[in-house]
Amino acid sequence: MTDLDSFITGLPKAELHLHIEGSLEPELMFALARRNRVTIPYASVEEVRAAYAFGNLQDFLDIYYAGAAVLLKRQDFHDLALAYFDRAAADGVVHAEIMFDPQTHTDRGIAFAEVIEGLLSAMAEAEARHGLSSRLILSFLRHLSEEAAFATLAEAEPWLDRIAAVGLDSSEVGHPPAKFARVYAAAAAKGLRLTAHAGEEGPPAYVREALDLLHVERIDHGNRALEDAALVDRLAREGMTLTVCPLSNLKLCVVDDLAHHPIDTMLARGLRATVNSDDPAYFGGYIADNYRAVARARGLGKAELATLARNSFAGSFLPPEVIAAHIDRLDEWVAAH
Ligand code: HPA
Ligand SMILES: [Zn+2]
């Protein structure tokens, strides 16, 4: 390991953009298919990995939703999330805010309780095992209706004290944030924090809608905001966090080459960018792999990497005093390395 590799692994960091269903490794997919007697359209782990070549977001989503079919029981969601937390802890993650897509499961007849109780028990175990804190982000599937999102929010009611925020994911183009303005207002009224995917494939106007109509506190991805200079100035002025996912951007053809990834441009323009893994089992790397990939491709040094990690705590949904303590510890760690 080079000095920069071990700096990246050891750097205390938060992960803010992670779909727990996207952390389903092919090995676990096979194990759960066997355990639950679910048929999957692959003969081997190698065949699964070979299928992970995507031309765009929808290519990926089709395979990602199909993979989730092996998740049936509380224990499955627990095993899935604990495997992620073990892997994240090894990458220096001390806090993770994980998204889950209830509709992917409830639409298959799985009870909301099975999904969330499995995730919550893994979160408790991760805290005990690694000292890794975590929060849940309930994400609405934007290709489904406003009515379906409202129904999902209603199903979540008994667990609202254990859900930090709502998010918005799935097929972006054709499903603008405006479609969910009323759902987001209802979520905010229930005390939930707000984030949404915007500007991954969708235009800068979707990022503006997320700000103006959803009143989000962070933007997931946000790459295409860079096409609009006035929007960039606004995001910088408002200190908006962008949860950027470099290997995802490469695999989903949001960038053609990591050598052209805009992460350092974002920092240079004063944007509060962070680095995250999105769907690590599908995109070829966990969070430290993402830091390493952009560090190599864009020549980032320790100071920029520390800024990305500092931004990850600053943009989290933790209370201000907890954020301040994380940043103090990070700064001490950086000074010693
Ligand atoms: O990167 C993503 N974009 C939109 N929806 C998603 N669901 C999982 N990952 C993603
Ligand atoms: Zn995402």
Image: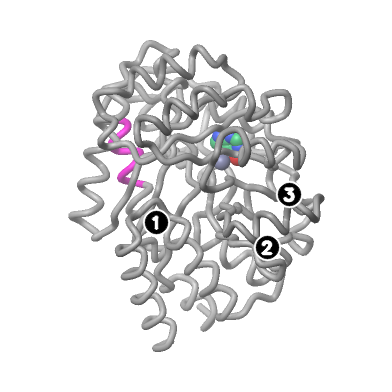
Q: Is residue 254 above or below residue 7?
A: above
Asked whether the viewer can see residue 131, the reply is: yes
Q: Which is nearer the N-term, disc 1 or disc 2?
A: 1
Q: Amino acid at mark 3?
A: Ala
- What distance separates the C-alpha of mark 2 from that of mark 3? 12 Å
Residue extending furthest left?
Answer: 128
Question: What residue is rendered at 33% in x and 18% in y?
Answer: 155
* Magenta span: chief secondary structure: helix
**Tag 1 residue:** 88
| Lower position in the chain sequence, tag 3 or tag 1 | 1
Question: What range of the chain is rendered magenta?
Answer: 76-83
Percent coordinates x, y for residue 44 in the rendering: 51, 33
Camera-near label (2 vs 3) is: 3
Q: Nearer the viewer, residue 100 or 59?
A: 100
The residue wearing badge 3 is 225
Position of 70 relative to 323 (above/below): above
Q: Which mark is residue 263?
A: 2
Q: Regarding mark 2 in the picture, which secondary structure is present there? A: helix
Asked if one can make out residue 47 in the rendered structure from this viewpoint, the answer is no
**What kind of element bears circle 1?**
helix
* Eye-nearest disc, 1 or 2: 2
